[in-house]
Amino acid sequence: MAFVPEKPPIHGETPETLGQRLSAQGYPGYRAAQIFEWVFKRRAESPEVMTNLPAPLRAWLADTFDFSPTTVLGKKTASDVTQKLLQRLRDGSLIETVIIRAPMEGVGQEQSRRTICISTQVGCAFGCKFCASGLEGLKRNLSVGEIVCQLIQVCRIEDAVSPERAAEGLASFDNIVVMGMGEPMANYENLMAALRAANAPWGFGFGARRITISTSGVVPKILELAEESLGVRLAISLHGATNEVREQIMPVNRKWPLEELLPACKVFARKHGRMLTLEYILIDAINDGLDQAKRLGEIARDLHAHVNLIPYNTVQGLAWKRPSLTRQERFAGIVRQAGISVTLRREKGHDIDAACGQLRLQTEKAQGDNLPPAVA
Ligand code: SAH
Ligand code: SF4
């Protein structure tokens, strides 16, 4: 399952690992800091532009590391300012990164808040019945460098919109949600290394509180995350408020049923003193019964959690549909009655198939191996 690239991505290095390799070549330690500055803060696409490095070092870097572990093949923009980047990895696999712009009154596009949604795996082994990412199983985990490079690809695009962030060497987005393709907790080590790089001063210096990991409920990893010093936020893909309903749509519930998942969530919330988010996709006549709404309200109250209701996005090949607007609102109303803060998401990016894994699946189906050319 592991893919070993010809050269390791530079984006997967740390000051320690890069420092060691540099000193083995006879270069002083401060060169690592200069290289990270180019990679993260100046979004360099190759060592050629690293003009403060000696030419032999630039040549060694080019020979030793991959500076483009992901290549943007195309961008799809939805009318409501969601943009999706389809990227090709070195082994030909496809992944997606989504940029979601929250339009803000009185400010232009360049100042609106940007949340980016990153992928952690190619495909997914968890097989949730509503999700396009899991339809064809898991191909492989992403490497640290492939996860980090998604962040840098977004910066390259967004720098054109708001160059002042780039000028300060900051990431040109406001939030990271780990909600793209794959189950983040099944690629825990690589994900955490990538997030530590984003958070580190030598990376983007990006605040951990602005990072949210979403999981389908891998209990041991939720407990491990609770012990991490990196204080990221947690979202739980609940999608069913009783075992009976949840296990029909999420096989993971058989391994870690609610009586194990909910106490683990409580441990996390207590350690971090922060609100969790419960994600709940509304699927017509599957999990949108009013008994589920009532139980969801109780669970959220017990966990002091926020509830995010997401109308189901139709996946090709699945018969399900989203409930009517009235039914969605009735469900939200009942959860709210329990004193819970609830958002009913107006699905962003519905018209570009922004739900998890859908663009990649369609592209693979339509094109086989004849992928579109890279976009500069
Ligand atoms: N594996 C992790 C993170 C990726 S999936 C997890 O399950 O939490 C994250 C989210 O993608 C889901 O919680 C859901 O919000 C969204 N999603 C997947 N399929 C969807 C669909 N058909 N309609 C709407 N949202 C969907
Ligand atoms: Fe995997 Fe998450 Fe999709 Fe479930 S919802 S199949 S865990 S990516």
Image (tube, rainbow, N blue to C red):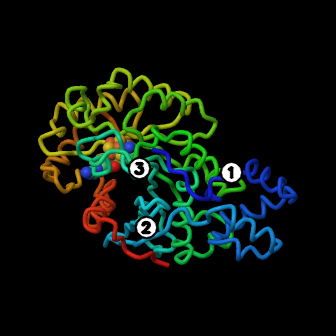
- The crowding category of the residue bearing disc 3, from other C-alpha atoms within 10 Å (few below 14, some 14 to 19, many at least 20), is many
Instruction: State the residue in front, 252 or 324.
Output: 252
Residue at point 46%, 59% (across, down): 91
Instruction: State the residue in front, 5 or 280.
Output: 5
- The crowding category of the residue bearing disc 2, from other C-alpha atoms within 10 Å (few below 14, some 14 to 19, many at least 20), is few
Kindly identify the amino acid type of the residue bearing the numbered disc 3.
Met
Which of marks 3 and 2 precedes in the sequence?
A: 2
Q: Position of residue 279 (x, y in %)?
A: 34, 42
Disc number placed over residue 179 in the picture, else none = 3
Kindly identify the amino acid type of the residue bearing the numbered disc 2.
Met
Instruction: Work out whether 71 lies above or below 11.
Output: below
Secondary structure found at label 1: loop
Which of marks 2 and 1 precedes in the sequence?
A: 2
Disc number placed over residue 200 in the picture, else none = 1
Circle 2 is placed at which residue position? 104
Q: Is residue 90 visible?
A: yes
Which of marks 1 and 3 precedes in the sequence?
A: 3
